[in-house]
Image (cartoon, grey):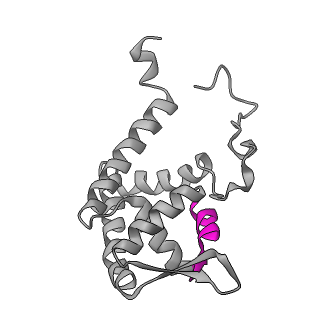
Amino acid sequence: MPVSRVIATPTWLLGRANARAQLLLARAFSEFGLRPVHYRTLAALEEHGELSQVELGRHLALDRKDVALTVDFLADRSLVDRRPDPSDRRRNIVALSDPGRDLLPRLHLTLDAVQHEVLAPLTDREAARLMTILPKLAPTNTGRDESDGEHMQPHRKSARKGPVR
């Protein structure tokens, strides 16, 4: 397939836009010695309160191993506290620590600045329009309970002519 055919497809363009956005996000959080998944973890704990590692994984759509590695990383930096669940010693409960809670406002500002940078090439009107369209293309449930992939099936309007690329 010629490159000129590929670079005009939604899959290619969305992938390139995502790569740029993720790079900007990773660079911004690296200033704090963190990755985006670390921010998402801290933000989930701020929003939902203390959680078991299993519950945290569900909120973040991460498997157990990735949750454990993320929590280990954050606990080593004293950004979260982890303790055994008193009702089931096999489970761990994770909560924001005071240093983690203190860092979050700066991380929120960093996230906001990245959003502005991602949308900077667009006019305000284009950015607003994009933000109304993107949710239609992205699954909204981050849980693992939709593992059959049905929520990711392509949607085709009956009026559309020709193949969807």
Quarter the C terminus occupies: top right
The residue at the point 35 percent across, 67 percent down is 112
Closest to the observer: 159 or 144? 144
Q: How many labels were placed on the picture?
A: 0
The residue at the point 23 percent across, 64 percent down is 31
Residue lying farthest to the front in this orientation? 89
Closest to the observer: 62 or 142? 62
The residue at the point 46 percent across, 38 percent down is 14
Closest to the observer: 111 or 81? 81
The part of the image, by quadrant, that contains residue 5 is top left
Asked if 98 appears above or below 140 in the picture, the reply is below
Q: Is residue 54 magenta?
A: yes
The part of the image, by quadrant, that contains residue 37 is bottom left
Q: Which residues are magenta?
A: 48-60
Relative image position of residue 127 (x, y in whole percent)? 41, 54
Residue lying farthest to the left in this orientation? 31
Closest to the observer: 25 or 147? 147
Residue 32 lies left or right of residue 129; in this view the side is left
Relative image position of residue 126 (x, y in whole percent)? 41, 51
Q: Is residue 91 magenta?
A: no
Relative image position of residue 54 (x, y in whole percent)? 64, 67
The residue at the point 53 percent across, 62 percent down is 67
Residue 145 lies left or right of residue 58; in this view the side is right
